Structure formats: C-alpha cells, structure tokens
Amino acid sequence: MIEVEIKVRILDPKIIKNKFEENKGVYKLSLLHEDTYFNMPKGLRDFKKTDEALRLRRSIEFNKKELTSEQRINHYITYKGKKLDGSTKTREEIDIKIEDINRMKNLLRELGFQEVLTIKKERDLYEFEFKSLHIEALIDYLPILDQHFIEVECLLKTSENIEASKEVLFDFLSLFGIKKEDSIRQSYLELIADKLKNNLKKK
C-alpha cells in the first residue's frame, strides 16, 4: 500500500478538535503508541541514508469519551519505504499485525538489527469523507518534543493517484487554516534525533 501523508505542527489541539467536529469529523478512538525503530545489521544498508524505516509498535487503543471504555492492546511490525515526493511524507508502507512483540524484538536483535530509539505518542483519531476520499486525521502529542501535530493520511493501492490525493489532503487542511508550506517531511524519528543532536551540541 502507498500511504499519502501530510504532517504539520499545531499550537492548540483543542481548537483543532473543535474545528474537526464542526467539519463533520468523526472521533474514532484514542491511542497510546510506543514505537521502537530498528536499523539494518552493520555492513548492510543504512536506513538513515536510504530514508527507510523499520518499526515495532505497541498500540493501546481506547475511547476517551466513554468512562467505562476498555483498553485494547495490539502489536505491529511496519516497514516504510523512502519518501516518494518533495512536499509530503508519502511512501510505501507494509504493516503486519503480530502476536508477541517481545519475541519479534528478540528475533530482530538475534539477526543483528540495531535498535535505534523508542518514541511515545498520544493520539486522537478522527475520520472524514472529503471530496470522495476517506481521510484519517490524527492529533498527536509527543512528550519528548512537547509539541502537538496533525497527521492526515489516506491509503492507495498503487502510485497512480498520489498527486491527486495530495491535492485533496492539502485542500482538506486548508479548512483549518493550514497551508502547503506548513507541511513537515521529517518523520518523528528524524525530528527527535535532530533535537537530541542539538542538545548534545549545547553541552
């Protein structure tokens, strides 16, 4: 699958949530994600240079609007290919649900994969139908960055409609005062790595 994705920083998530609901956004669920990223074994290709990613995810899902909502825990392994354009985070994505994340982590380590970083995210997921496109919109908070973001995305079976889908997503974001130039191509992993690198320079 091709994931067409646009990410932007936001200052006030409450304002965005209100605007989502005003524009017929449907709140689906909230998530706590713990993502552990891996690089290839030494001597093989470097994901940092090839713009790829391999991730193990622990996902806790719940409905914050229901006081008695039960938590569901799922685990996934995900491969992300290099970005396919210069303005968004569009890339191939292969996402597989797994039963035992710890055994998978041990397997990767035994094969020589290098553990890079673990990132925690707090997320609220909304869904929209906009211009014949099914859009998932996530309002994210990353404690390590102390920043909020929006990620909007749709899934395509082939790369034929990437440009048209990008334009629809940018049109969708314009409803909330967000412009094309606000798009961030860096992944959360890259943003956090940059922050850690800058913190080291200051010491």
Image: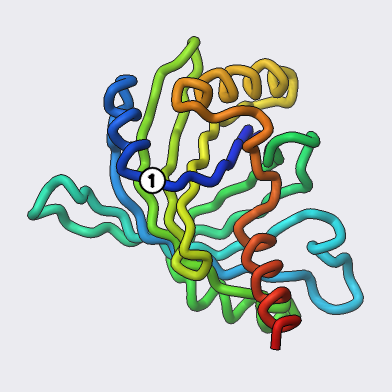
- For residue 179, above or below residue 93: above
Point 64% across, 19% down: residue: 167
- For residue 112, above or below residue 33: below
Percent x, y for residue 8?
Answer: 56, 42
- For residue 166, above or below residue 18: above
Viewer-proximal residue, 107 or 1? 1
Q: Residue furthest top?
A: 131
Q: Which three-letter amino acid code belongs to the residue tagged 1?
A: Asp
- Chosen colour scheme: rainbow
Viewer-proximal residue, 105 or 182? 182
Q: Quadrant of residue 28?
A: top left
Q: Is residue 75 in view?
A: no
Q: The C terminus is located in which quarter?
A: bottom right
Viewer-proximal residue, 69 or 111? 69
On screen, residue 97 versus residue 192, left or right, reads left
Residue at disc 1, secondary structure: loop
- For residue 93, above or below residue 57: above
Point 27% across, 57% down: residue: 72
Q: Residue furthest front?
A: 202
Q: Quadrant of residue 54?
A: bottom right
Point 31% across, 54% down: residue: 61
Viewer-proximal residue, 78 or 147? 147
Percent x, y for residue 178?
Answer: 54, 30
Q: The N terminus is located in which quarter?
A: top right
Q: Is residue 93 in view?
A: yes
Percent x, y for residue 77?
Answer: 56, 59
* Total numbered circles: 1
**Label 1 crowd (10 A; few <14 / some 14-19 / many >=20):** few
From the image, tell me which residue sits under label 1.
Answer: 12
